[in-house]
């Protein structure tokens, strides 16, 4: 499985840095942006794949682990730097876990919310990838 981290351009300034996400930063057209916050450290998010949508996960604050599965291989990526985002292609199972206190995960998606695009059962996901 190829893990692709996207470098988020940063404008450095002694008053504080600015991370910039524009159309050239993300390898797809941005259709939706949302974020996860106040996630208890014992909680897990995700637990699904998308048939068509891709996503870029950016840790705006704190850290968390992203467990990926492409139907053949499993990999875990720890996100903890706001200038690096994890690209999750379509048909990739993802689970987010081990959230640190104050963690915020921004998700940039290639599609608007569409329940029909979700695969929410791991066995169904494996059946589609075989």
Image (cartoon, grey):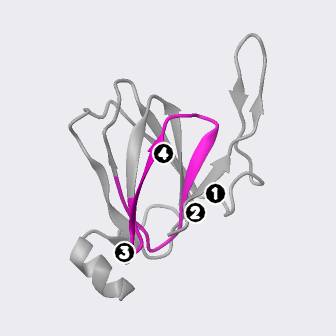
The residue to which callout 3 is attached is 116
Checking the image for residue 34, the label placed there is 4
Q: Does the residue at mark 4 contact the one at mark 2 (Cβ under 8 Å)?
A: no
**Which of the two labelled residues, at mark 3 and mark 1, occupies the earlier sequence position?**
1
Instruction: Check disc 1: other Cα within 10 Å, few if <14, some if 14-19, many if 20+.
Output: some
The span picked out in magenta is: 68-95
Residue 21 in the figure: left or right of residue 45 = right
The quarter of the picture where residue 115 lies is: bottom left
The residue to which callout 1 is attached is 30
Q: Does the residue at mark 2 contact the one at mark 1 (Cβ under 8 Å)?
A: yes
Q: Does the residue at mark 3 contact the one at mark 2 (Cβ under 8 Å)?
A: no
The quarter of the picture where residue 92 lies is: bottom left
The residue to which callout 2 is attached is 110
**Which of the two labelled residues, at mark 3 and mark 4, occupies the earlier sequence position?**
4
Q: Position of residue 65 (x, y in %)?
A: 39, 45
Instruction: Check disc 2: other Cα within 10 Å, few if <14, some if 14-19, many if 20+.
Output: many
Q: Position of residue 64 (x, y in %)?
A: 39, 39
């Amino acid at each position: 499985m190829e893990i692709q981290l996207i470098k988020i351009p940063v404008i450095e300034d002694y008053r504080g840095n600015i991370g910039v996400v524009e159309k050239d930063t993300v390898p797809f057209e941005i259709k939706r942006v949302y974020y996860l916050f106040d996630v208890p450290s014992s909680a897990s998010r995700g637990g699904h794949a998308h048939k068509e949508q891709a996503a870029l996960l950016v840790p705006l604050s704190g850290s968390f682990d992203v467990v990926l599965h492409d139907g053949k291989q499993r990999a875990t990526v720890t996100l903890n730097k706001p200038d690096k985002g994890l690209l999750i292609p379509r048909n990739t199972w993802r689970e987010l876990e081990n959230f640190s206190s104050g963690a915020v995960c921004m998700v940039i998606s290639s599609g608007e919310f569409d329940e029909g695009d979700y695969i929410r059962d791991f066995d169904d996901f494996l059946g589609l990838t075989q």
